Image (tube, grey):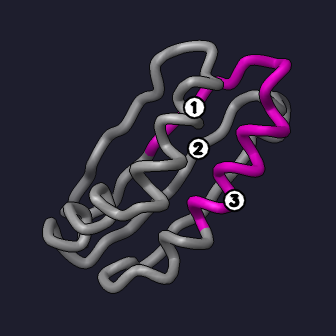
């Protein structure tokens, strides 16, 4: 299993729009074959700090996800609302 942690720091004026887009991304991603989990979280002490916690069965599932219409449509819009470049890190269990 492959886990992905995507961290977003959002402009204060764009938090609600980001959250709406991210919730749509979560919904579409959870329905994909090969998805194990896909969760959107916001920091308890910072409403503009989000993380997406993902788990995928394998690389093929991640490649399909990255090519999906909801990913290719929503993620660029989410990035445009960011105050800084998002961080995306992939992990494997040890």
First to last magenta residue range: 6-26
Q: Is label 1 in contact with label 2 (beta carbons under 8 Å)?
A: yes
The residue at the point 59 percent across, 64 percent down is 26
Residue 30 rendering spot, x and y as whole percentages = 51, 77
Residue under numbered circle 1:
8
Upstream in the sequence, badge 1 or badge 3? 1
Upstream in the sequence, badge 1 or badge 2? 1
Question: For the residue labelled by badge 2, is the local secondary structure a helix, a strand or a loop?
Answer: strand
The C terminus lies in which quarter of the figure?
bottom left
The residue at the point 35 percent across, 64 percent down is 68
Badge number at residue 51: 2
* Pair 1/3: label in front: 3
Q: Is residue 68 left or right of residue 21?
A: left
The N terminus lies in which quarter of the figure?
bottom left
Residue under numbered circle 3:
23
The alpha-carbon separation of the residues under discs 1 and 2 comes to 6 Å
Question: For the residue labelled by badge 3, is the local secondary structure a helix, a strand or a loop?
Answer: helix
Identify whether 29 is placed above or below 18.
below
Task: Looking at the picture, tell me which residue is in the foreground, 6 or 45.
Answer: 6
Identify whether 40 is placed above or below 55.
above
């Amino acid at each position: 299993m492959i886990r992905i942690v995507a961290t977003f720091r959002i402009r204060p004026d764009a938090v609600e729009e980001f959250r709406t887009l991210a919730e749509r991304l979560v919904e579409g991603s959870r329905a994909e074959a090969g998805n194990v989990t896909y969760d959107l979280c916001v920091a308890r002490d910072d409403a503009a700090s989000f993380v997406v916690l993902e788990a995928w069965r394998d690389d093929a599932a991640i490649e399909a996800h990255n090519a999906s219409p909801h990913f290719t449509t929503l993620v660029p819009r989410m990035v445009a609302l960011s105050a800084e470049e998002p961080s995306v890190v992939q992990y494997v269990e040890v």
